[in-house]
Amino acid sequence: MTEDTFYYWRRKLQLDLPPDEKVLEKSSAGKFFRPFFFFPFACFTEIFCPIRVEGAENIPKAGPYIIAPNHVSILDYPTLALKLDPSITSDLYVLSSRAYYDVAVARFFMKWVANVIRVDITEDFLGTLRLGSYVLRLGKNLVVFPEGTRSKTGELSPFRIGLGVLSIECNVPIVPVYISGLEKVLPKGAPHPSFGGVRVCFGAPLYPDKYKKDLTEEHAYYLYKELTEEVQQRVLNLKNSVNK
Amino acid sequence: MATELESELKTLVSKVIKVPEDKINPETDFFRDLKIDSLLAVEILASIDRKYGIDIPEQKVNKIRTLNDIVLVVNECISKKKL
């Protein structure tokens, strides 16, 4: 790949400029408020939806990397954050739709507890990817929900190709994750939670190396798409293994 | 009657999104009618950048939905570049 092959994406993601560190700013009160959120949340999950984690050994020992789970509930990210080691979650950021800020509890959680970056992928696709690339280039890990929105049925929606762009252009692996059970505990639109078990399954990470070596300007889109579709297939495989 | 620029851009878009030119009319909505995704839309802009040497400002990108929109924006950018 020549230096100027992906000039356009390099310029749009500002890969030749230092990443904007402001993207990592978080409330200093976060550390104080975390226990006040996660302790009751842990109690809530023990009562309503005991969580079992599988495959955590697949998470790379060193970052940065992207965690790509399916998306069925507003509890998806808190569930991940609750069950991952604190040394991982302190460096874990999530891109979240501005729409979640309409929900009061979500607003509190995002502002005071979690490393959430508000984005509007529909209105500002390039800006969203750029923010994601800043996080990764600053050595932090990123949760990306590739379906873009919560599935109403629990079935996987097509994964958005921005995932492939971030992985290939920032040269970071993707960890596919399947979260099972939250679509019954607190699905989209549900007024209250229900009882049910939850499993969080981490798959083996996908590295962008094999896609990067074939990268040319004409084929870029198809390689981003191919990598994204491979991640989707891995998440589907995890789903199938959970449902056996 | 299509201008030369409109014809060129139609050919460019057709090549990027792999849709025959006769399916791309001036008011065809890329997202609603041709079902392209945001990334492919960016690839169109990347191709325009490579061909004409113009970088469409991001604030205009989100308003582009049809071939007509692209022709208008590209015309504007080319005119600014000449000044």
Image (spheres, coloured by chain):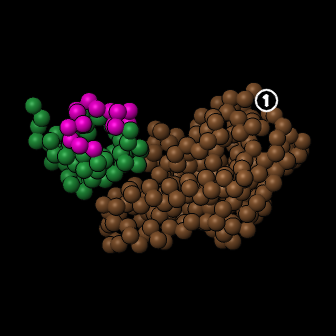
Q: Position of residue B29 (x, y in %)?
A: 32, 33
Q: Dot 1: few (<14), some (14–19), or many (≥20) neighbours within 10 Å?
A: few
Does B63 appear above or below A206?
A: above
Q: Position of residue A29 (x, y in %)?
A: 76, 48
Task: Report the residue marked by disc 1.
Answer: A192
Whether residue B80 is visible: no
Q: Residue at x 12, y 35 (%)?
A: B2
Number of numbered discs: 1
Which chain is rendered brown in the image?
A
Which one is nearer the viewer's eye here, A237 or A170? A237
Q: Is residue B61 left or right of residue A49?
A: left
Amino acid on which disc 1 is placed:
His
Q: Colour of chain B?
A: green
Q: Is residue A238 left or right of residue B55?
A: right
Q: Quadrant of the N terminus of chain A?
A: bottom left
Majority secondary structure in the magenta region:
loop
Q: Magenta region: which residues?
A: B19-34
Q: Residue at x 41, y 72 (%)?
A: A213
Q: Residue at x 73, y 63 (%)?
A: A55
Q: Could you tell me which secondary element the residue under label 1 belongs to?
A: loop
